[in-house]
Image: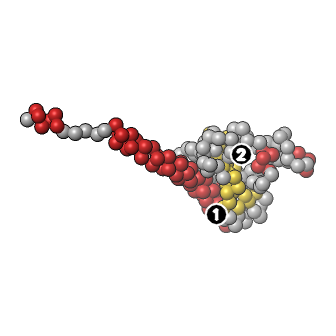
Amino acid sequence: MFAKLRDRGGFTLIELMLVIAIVGLLSSIAIPNYMNYQAKTRQAEAKTNLGGIYTNEAAYWSEKDKYVDDFYDIGFGTGGRAKYYDFTIKAPPVMSGTPPDITCSWVVDSWIGKHGTPGDGPAGLSPAIIYLNYVSGADGQSFTALAIGNIDTDEVFDTWTINHRAELDNHGDDIFR
């Protein structure tokens, strides 16, 4: 009986190294795809909450015949706590009609999201950067809501907008590169 146990073969070092190489190769393919998938699921937070803002603004419009830039007025709030995005409808004021610069800033309490409810928006983001592409806000006849988040902790922000026509746009994609 002991002779049978001694005759059993095991794995050779080459076989073990080959298995490790195959696992490493599969991991190098799977991990980037998983990270991309994870980032896309994080973007669902922005899409869902912007859809909620649109729904609340449309309901407000049907009652009052105007759009507003105040979450309290339209009855919007994030369920629980937002994890990756901050949301606003208010636009930062522009100083005396000049192009936006670093001195422009959103008023405190114009944001709702991960930095508190209400809050003052994403840390480290200049309103001048936002003005280059789009401006959030409501003027009574239209509105544009803005979601900004950093879903992969780099220096790039993921930015989404939705307007009174339910046009959802991704202006700055922060998907892993």
Expressed as whole percent of the image width and height from the top left, the position of residue 54 reads 64, 60
- Residue 85 can be seen in this image: no
Along the horizontal axis of the image, is 127 left or right of 153?
Answer: right
**As rendered, which of 70 and 45 lies closer to the eye?**
45
Q: Nearer the viewer, residue 132 or 37?
A: 37
Q: Is residue 100 left or right of residue 46?
A: right
Position of the N terminus, as image quadrant, is top left
* Residue that mark 2 sits on: 110
Quadrant in the rendering for residue 127: top right
Q: Nearer the viewer, residue 129 or 46?
A: 129
Q: Position of residue 52 (x, y in %)?
A: 60, 58
Say which element carries label 1. helix
Q: Is residue 159 visible?
A: yes
Query: Which type of secondary structure does the marked residue at label 2 adopt?
Result: loop
Going from the N terminus, do you reach mark 2 or mark 1 first? Answer: 1
Picture colour scheme: secondary structure
Q: How many callouts does the rendering have?
A: 2
Measured from the top left, where is residue 44 in percent x and y? 56, 54
Residue under the point 34% across and 37% down: 13
Within-10-Å neighbours for mark 2: few <14, some 14–19, many 20+? many
Q: Residue at x 80, y 51 (%)?
A: 131
- Name the residue at 70% across, 61% down: 163
Whole-number angstrom distance, CA of label 2 to CA of label 1: 20 Å
Q: Residue at x 34, y 42 (%)?
A: 15
Q: Name the mark on residue 158.
A: none
What amino acid type should be assigned to the residue bearing mark 1?
Answer: Ala
Q: Which residue is mark 1?
A: 59
Q: Between tags 2 and 1, which lies in front? A: 2
Seen in the picture, residue 165 relative to 46 is either above or below; the reply is below
Mark 1 closeness class: few <14, some 14–19, many ≥20 residues within 10 Å:
some
Tag 2: amino acid: Ser
